Amino acid sequence: MDDNFPKEEELCRVIFRPTGINWKKEDGSITSSVFKSKDKGLSVDRGNFREREEIKKCFFSRKSKNDFSAFVFIDVKMCNFEDTDMNPAVIVYNPTTDNEFHSEIYKEYDPQNNRSKGLTGGQSRYLARHADVDIL
């Protein structure tokens, strides 16, 4: 795998328990907080064209199933924010020792100058509205 993310590839973000801030009480949909990060990059796993059940099994091999409340899926294409005035996000393949699929999403990414920015509020809201949520 490399930094080439085909637009049809899925990315997966997990919602850990407890989940209070991630759900809208009115309709049960996710909030944009699912796509915001305390640090600069938003941690996701790339799907690498695996079945969703296989992606979930990979997460369950690293943490207990009881730690998760939902899996949130987006397509790479959504991160291009087509039909909007927002700039495309930058997706970086960043595997870890225990997760070969780990990647990160940024608004801007410049590792040579040690500068990067997390997604904007508008980008986070867009992804939340277009995501596919599998509740456990």
Image (spheres, rainbow, N blue to C red):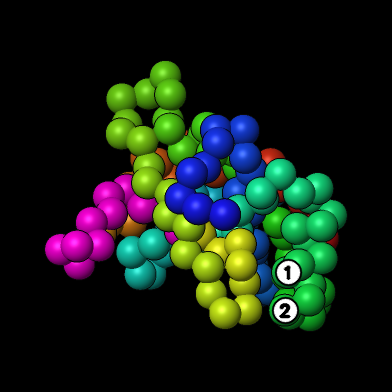
Q: Which residue is mark 2?
A: 62
Dot 1 and dot 2 residues touching (CB under 8 Å) = yes
Residue farthest to the front, as pictured: 1
Q: Is residue 32 above or below residue 131?
A: below
* Closer-to-camera residue (93/21): 93
Q: Secondary structure at mark 1?
A: helix
In this image, 69 relative to 123: left or right? right
Which is more toward the observer, 98 or 33?
98
In the rendered image, which quarter is residue 1 located in? bottom right
Residue depicted at x 30% and y 34%:
87
- Residue 105 falls inside the magenta stretch: yes
* Residue lying at 55% horizontally and 36% vertically, measured from the top left: 6
| Residue at the far top in the pictured view | 83
Asked whether residue 34 appears in the rendered view, the answer is: no
The amino acid on which the numbered mark 2 sits, given as a three-letter code, is: Arg
Check disc 1 and give the amino acid type. Answer: Phe
Q: Describe the element under mark 2 as helix, strand or loop.
A: loop
Q: Tell me if mark 1 has few (under 14), some (14-19) or many (20+) residues whose alpha carbon lies within 10 angstroms of its own.
A: some
Query: Picture coordinates of residue 84 (x, y %)?
Result: 37, 23
Q: Is residue 84 magenta?
A: no
> Which residues, given as a range, are shown in magenta?
104-115
The answer to whether residue 96 is seen in the rendering is: yes
Q: In the drawing, does residue 27 fall left or right of residue 33?
A: right
Dot label at residue 125: none
Pointer 1 residue: 59
- In this rendering, position of residue 84 left or right of residue 1: left
Query: Which residue is most to the left?
Result: 113
Which quarter of the rendering shows the C terminus? bottom right
Residue at 15%, 63% (x, y): give it. 113
Q: Is residue 62 above or below residue 93?
A: below
Instruction: Find residue 81 and report its horizontal and vertical position in percent.
Output: 42, 30
Residue 102 image position (x, y, % from top left)? 56, 64
